Image (spheres, helix red, strand yellow):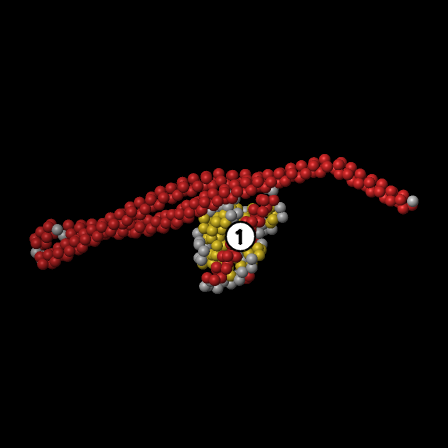
Amino acid sequence: MRDMIKYLNQTLRASALCTGALLCLVISLPSLAANQNQLDGVKQEISRQQSQLSSKQKKITSLQKSLKQQELAIAAAARKIHAAEGELSTLESSIRQFHGQLQQLQQQQVGQQEMLKELLNNHYRQGKNSQLASLLSGEDSTELDRMSVYAERLSAARARALDELAATTTELQLKQHQLNQQKQQQKNTLAELKTEKSKLEAEQRKRKKTVRTIKTQLKSDTQYLTELQTNEKRLVDEIAKAKAAAEAARRVPMDGLAKRKGKLPWPVKGKVLHQYGSSQQGELRWKGMVISKSAGSQVKAVYPGKVVFADWLRGYGLMLVIDHGKGDMSFYGYNQTLLKKVGDTVQANDAIALVGDSGGQDQSALYFEIRRKGSPTNPVSWLTK
């Protein structure tokens, strides 16, 4: 009997548990359905956000490509303008030199004309009247003939010299005219190039405005930070490649910057917009410094070395890198155009580029960075105070 009661109690407890479990399952079914709907909604929102970010990234990538093309075109025009200005300066120097030569010849001409005038006066005074007086006075006619022949020969010599001087003056005037024509041609070319550059810069401003709009949209996203970090990685990767190539092709020894700390000249003189180590975006900090300077100003090398990179790089625009040896390198970005190419050897204070706003910058400035064995260091500590 006891065993029978025990069995019935166990059966009742099991039935109660089953009933409670079924009841809980029935009660929780609507909650599970609601949670599943919420999960589906979250997935859809994530998918939508990812799609928007992907679309934004594709758009900014496309605009960056257009920006690169525009900035390279501007760089080519600026380089031609720089060369044309140099040629114009040479022509102006030549013209000034020819002016000096012409003035000197004109002075010689005046002197020789005065001498010839005096000679003609003397010859006139020794003319027929003098001959008649000499005959009447009984002077020696042989002496008179000798003086006349001398005067005639001297007069002829002066006439020839004057003719030669006139021919030289004419030749110089012709050369001066030719030089003036070349100078005018150079001015016309310079004006055309500046007009072309203005058009390209106007187009660039449109592109950069669009890029800035997209960047503003991305500032609240982690993707903007990712863009900056990716730009940094691009720079490191490109420099690693360039350094490897430079090591293989090196012919001249370079002593590095170790002994030049605090003694290097500034690449440009201007207001520092961003200091080394200051915040760039979030936890990302500037690896170099940004120096404000008007567009077209010359960028100078801070120390002798070899150019190992000279190209457009996303985020940095037209970038030039100089290897100074022993793992020391200097970086010059945001340029309008580059005046040196990979493989060129440069000296301190050589003009290597022109200041610009390439890479999508809002204003003209120079990005300057120094790295030692691949690690960025504060460039201010290396420059003269």
Residue type at tag 1? Leu
Residue 44, image quadrant: top right
Which residue shows up at 66% across the image and 39% down it?
A: 39
Q: Nearer the viewer, residue 122 or 9?
A: 9
Q: Nearer the viewer, residue 199 or 346?
A: 199
Quadrant into which the N terminus falls: top right
- Residue 335 visible? The answer is yes
| Spot occupied by residue 59 in the image (x, y as percentages of width and height) | 52, 41
Quadrant into which the C terminus falls: bottom right
Determine the secondary structure under disc 1: helix
Which residue shows up at 24% across the image and 51% down it?
A: 168
Which residue shows up at 62% across the image and 46% down it?
A: 282
| Spot occupied by residue 45 in the image (x, y as percentages of width and height) | 62, 38
Q: Nearer the viewer, residue 2 or 219?
A: 2
Which residue shows up at 45% across the image and 45% down it?
A: 69
| Spot occupied by residue 314 in the image (x, y as percentages of width and height) | 51, 48
Q: In the drawing, does residue 283 fall left or right of residue 164?
A: right
| Spot occupied by residue 83 in the image (x, y as percentages of width and height) | 39, 49
Residue designated by label 1: 235
Q: In the drawing, does residue 369 fall left or right of residue 163?
A: right
Looking at this view, name the residue that lies furthest to the right.
Answer: 1
